[in-house]
Image: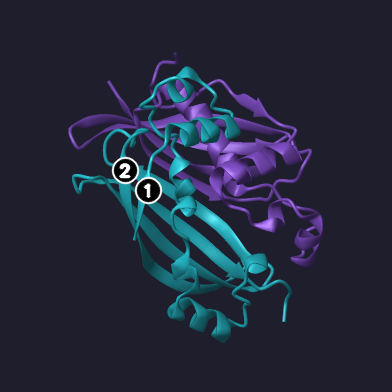
Chain colours: A purple, B cyan
Amino acid sequence: MIEIVPGARLPERTLGPVTMSDIVRYQGASGDLNPIHHDDEFARAAGFPAAISVGMLGAGWLAAYCTEHLGEETIRRFRTRFAAVVYRGDRLTASAEVVRLFQQDTESRVELSIRLRKDDGSVVIDGTAEFAVA
Amino acid sequence: MAIMPIERGKVREYAVATAAARPAYLDDPKAPVPPTFLATVVFWTPIGETLRGPEVLRACAEAGVPADLGSLLSLEQEYVFHGPPPRAGETLRTAERLRDVRVKQTRDGRAMVIIRFTVDFHDERGDLRAECNYTSAYVQRERP
């Protein structure tokens, strides 16, 4: 358990290389069956070189990373902005940094800035997460 | 509006699919939902009805952007929980509302229609438990 103070960072977690199995398993679980994520021809017709991963799969991985460190029951806000598309074979790293501690609705909360990036450093997802803390 | 039962098996499936296969999600019959789990509301009601609403279709027609799946991008999603997240065994009631529609340009000069909408999740007592704020966009494929 890390000390929750502004500037503290969670240990990073690596994910991938992203496979078609990761993508279709998430699509099946989530119910988002947009073919752009598993049909290369469909994706090419839409202007991509190949099928693109699901933005919400990256968000789900980031969510799993955050709850592992801060708890499953204490999540209060989880915001993700999709900055770049991910292709099969991409390797990703999840990271998070404590931004601030604050009070809301009689609860103490921590706000984290969260990020998923590729091996070349490009940002795939950035966002914020808030958890209740004791 | 739809009724969405939170099922234990679905929580397990979603947790496994997002690399969150931990006892808190897998072993507890009343497991809390993972932070982005409410995306599975699409099994109960088609989400994004607002993406095909008259205001959005008008904005797309005016901007010359096709309002189809191949042009649709998800830009942002935010889940807000008013207290602990819902748990397996609970039943939620959902409703979708449009927040706004804006037309912007991408960095390389293509038109995009940005739509913000929210899905609200109330429990059986009528308490608002969670909201999901979506920001999606229809983007022109090539420069005109």
Residue at left offset 40%, top offset 26%: A72
Gap between marks 2 and 1, in whole Å? Answer: 6 Å
Residue designated by label 1: B4
Placement of A132 over or under B93, stated as above or below: above
Percent x, y for residue B119? 37, 56
Q: Residue furthest top?
A: A1
Residue at left offset 45%, top offset 19%: B27
Placement of B102 over or under A33, stated as above or below: below
Percent x, y for residue B56? 48, 76
The quarter of the image holding the N terminus of chain B is bottom left
Circles 2 and 1, Cβ within 8 Å, touching? The answer is yes
Residue at left offset 49%, top offset 51%: B43
Q: Residue B31, located in which quarter of the rendered image?
A: top left
As drawn, is B22 to the left or to the right of A24?
left
Placement of A106 over or under A81, stated as above or below: above
The quarter of the image holding the C terminus of chain B is bottom right
Q: Secondary structure at mark 2?
A: strand
Percent x, y for residue A78? 42, 41
As drawn, is A19 to the left or to the right of B47?
right
Mark 2 vs 1, N-terminal side: 1
Residue designated by label 2: B91
Question: Disc 1 is attached to a residue of which chain?
Answer: B
